[in-house]
Image (cartoon, rainbow, N blue to C red):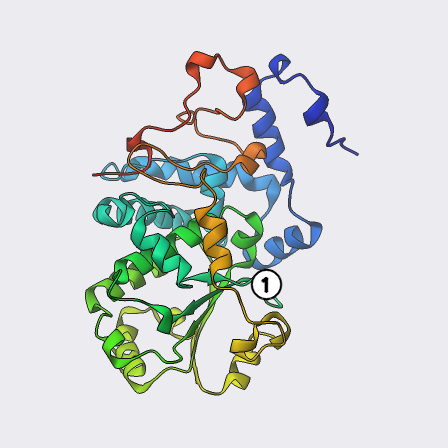
Amino acid sequence: MINLNFSISMNLAEISTVDVLDDMAEFGWGLSEELLLKSQKELGEEQSRHSEDIADVKEQIETRPDIKFLRTDDAFVLRFLRARKFDTVESFKLLARYFEFRQNNPSLFKNFIASEAGIKASLYDGLPSVLPNCDQKGRKIIVLFASNWDNGRYQLPSVYRAILLTLEKLIDDEACQINGFVFILDWSQFTFNQSRSLNPKVLKQMVEGLQDCFPARFGSIHFVNQPWYIEAICKIILPFLKEKSRRKIHMHGINLGLLHQFISKEVLPAELGGTLPEHNITSWAKELVGDENFSFGDKHIYWPDHCFFKTRSKSFPTFHLKQNLDPNEINSRLDEEFFLID
């Protein structure tokens, strides 16, 4: 049995950091046996093929010289493979669209940080928030309480940016990569005046970015307490969705019992007909805004500390392994060209 304590006692200066990270990545450490089996069954993941599958994706990068693939480390590529059930061709297409979407929509990712005024306001209004418990399939539950939207202070793009930032944070967790997400949109007391700020162009952009350009498994989207004008707007959006995506949208109206057929009441707060106390919509905002290290901006990019056991691209300075680096070589932030394109 491998002794996990060796990472603490071993003198890192005596070994090759890259070799250690490469070797550890092959074991899938951090994943439970249950998750490993689920990924194997549902996604076709074979850890013995990780290196081969990842290399296959990377080899295709040269076919798209028009796109700047700003991050191609193994751990990053792996999430795209999981999102496309280890079809290396489809995984590469998703990876390409991920960066192409950012190149084509630079304003969405400028000052892409939770403390940015519009994103912060949206998060503190519960747009979105993340429930503390997963559903019965292990999926994270992302909720949006639409009536909290103060469209006089921030517009729909800020809500979209808050959703994207939330997903970027959550998708770092390999359990989320395997289990996926479900969305619940509560339209209680959402006014017709508020609905007039649902810009069709931005809605189309949201569909494009979430459906085709993000490496996540979206299980289902549930609308509750939606008024007639929201249903009318949905009819406009539906043609932009793929058939598979359309089948994942469920309109429950005021019948929360229909929602509970998909998501157990035991993991839902009282306002969604659940058995738990009312959800504190600011809890996720405080976690995200309070994490000063989690940020994307003009001059830097976030890299999760817990990815120590992941391989990294050569362009990434492993500044958290300061034992191995000359202080003069340590950069606390990456160059803006690593993630953002103006």
In-front residue for pair 247/41: 247
In-front residue for pair 310/63: 310
Quadrant where the N terminus sits is top right
- Residue placed at 47% from the left, 43% from the top? 291
Indicate the position of residue 265 as horizontal and vertical percent values. 61, 76
As drawn, is 66 to the left or to the right of 127? left
The image shows residue 252, relative to residue 136, as above or below, that is below
Q: Quadrant of residue 22?
A: top right
The image shows residue 13, relative to residue 36, as above or below, that is above
Kindly identify the amino acid type of the residue bearing the numbered disc 1: Cys
Q: Quadrant of residue 233?
A: bottom left
Furthest toward the right, the residue is 1
* Residue linked to disc 1: 134
Q: Quadrant of residue 43?
A: bottom right
Indicate the position of residue 123 as horizontal and vertical percent values. 40, 58
Indicate the position of residue 196 as horizontal and vertical percent values. 21, 74
Q: Using the rendered image of the protein, determine whether residue 295 is visible from the camera's viewpoint.
A: yes
- Residue placed at 43% from the left, 53% from the top? 166
- Residue placed at 39% from the left, 63% from the top? 125
- Residue placed at 51% from the left, 83% from the top? 256
Q: Using the rendered image of the protein, determine whether residue 80 is visible from the camera's viewpoint.
A: no
Indicate the position of residue 276 as horizontal and vertical percent values. 62, 72
Q: Secondary structure at mark 1?
A: loop
Quadrant where the C terminus sits is top left
As drawn, is 47 to the left or to the right of 212? right
Count of number-bearing discs: 1
Query: Circle 1: is it few (<14), some (14-19), or many (20+) Cα within 10 Å?
Result: some
The image shows residue 301, relative to residue 97, as above or below, that is above
